[in-house]
Image: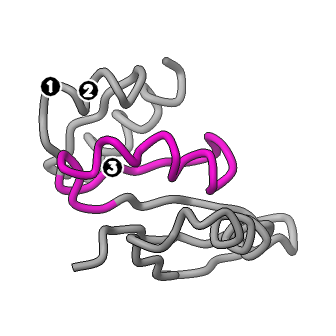
């Protein structure tokens, strides 16, 4: 709940037209379609792709914030054959202030 409140405050300050929900994604996806689902610090990529696989008819794309291990996680997901039907794009990279750690924003969508 705390992360959702912080995100909601940020969305309000930036005057974005974005809805923020706290809860299990599966419950939301069963009721409604979304152009974009944003995920941060939830699980390894292979686990996330597996969780969302049955819901792709309700999702346009997933934006995922990942830390430095994202390349390893991508390899793991590919090794398990989880990326065959998906496109993965690195949209941007940034350094976390106060550290040298690089994080990335990834986009995952269904192949057309």
Residue picked out by circle 3: 37
Taking the spot 26% from the left edge, 26% from the top edge, the residue there is 28
User: Eyeballing the image, is 32 above or below 85?
Assistant: above
C-alpha span from label 3 to label 2:
11 Å
What span is colored magenta in the figure? 35-61
Asked if 28 appears above or below 43 in the picture, the reply is above
Residue situated in front as seen by the camera: 29 or 2: 29
The circle on residue 5 is none
Measured in 3D between alpha carbons, the distance from the residue under mark 1 to the one under mark 3, in whole angstroms, is: 14 Å
Residue 32, image x, y percentages? 12, 33
Q: Secondary structure at mark 1?
A: loop
Q: Could you say whether the residue bearing mark 2 is in a helix, strand or loop?
A: helix
- Image quadrant holding the C terminus, namely bottom left
Whichever of labels 1 and 3 marks the residue nearer the N terminus, that label is 1
Q: Mark 3: give few (<14), some (14-19) or many (20+) Cα within 10 Å.
A: some
Q: Residue at x 48, y 40 (%)?
A: 51
Question: Which badge, 3 or 2, is on the more N-terminal residue?
Answer: 2
Q: Mark 3 falls on what kind of element?
A: strand
Judging by the rendered image, the residue that carries numbered circle 1 is 31
């Amino acid at each position: 709940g705390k992360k959702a409140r912080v995100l909601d405050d940020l969305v309000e300050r930036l005057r974005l037209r974005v809805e923020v929900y706290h809860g299990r994604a599966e419950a939301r996806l069963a009721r409604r379609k979304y152009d974009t689902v944003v995920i941060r610090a939830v699980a390894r990529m292979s686990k996330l792709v597996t969780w969302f696989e049955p819901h792709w008819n309700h999702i346009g794309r997933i934006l995922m914030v990942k830390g430095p291990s994202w390349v390893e996680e991508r390899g793991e997901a590919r090794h398990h054959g989880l990326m065959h039907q998906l496109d993965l794009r690195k949209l941007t990279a940034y350094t976390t202030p106060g550290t040298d750690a690089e994080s990335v924003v990834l986009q995952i969508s269904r192949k057309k």
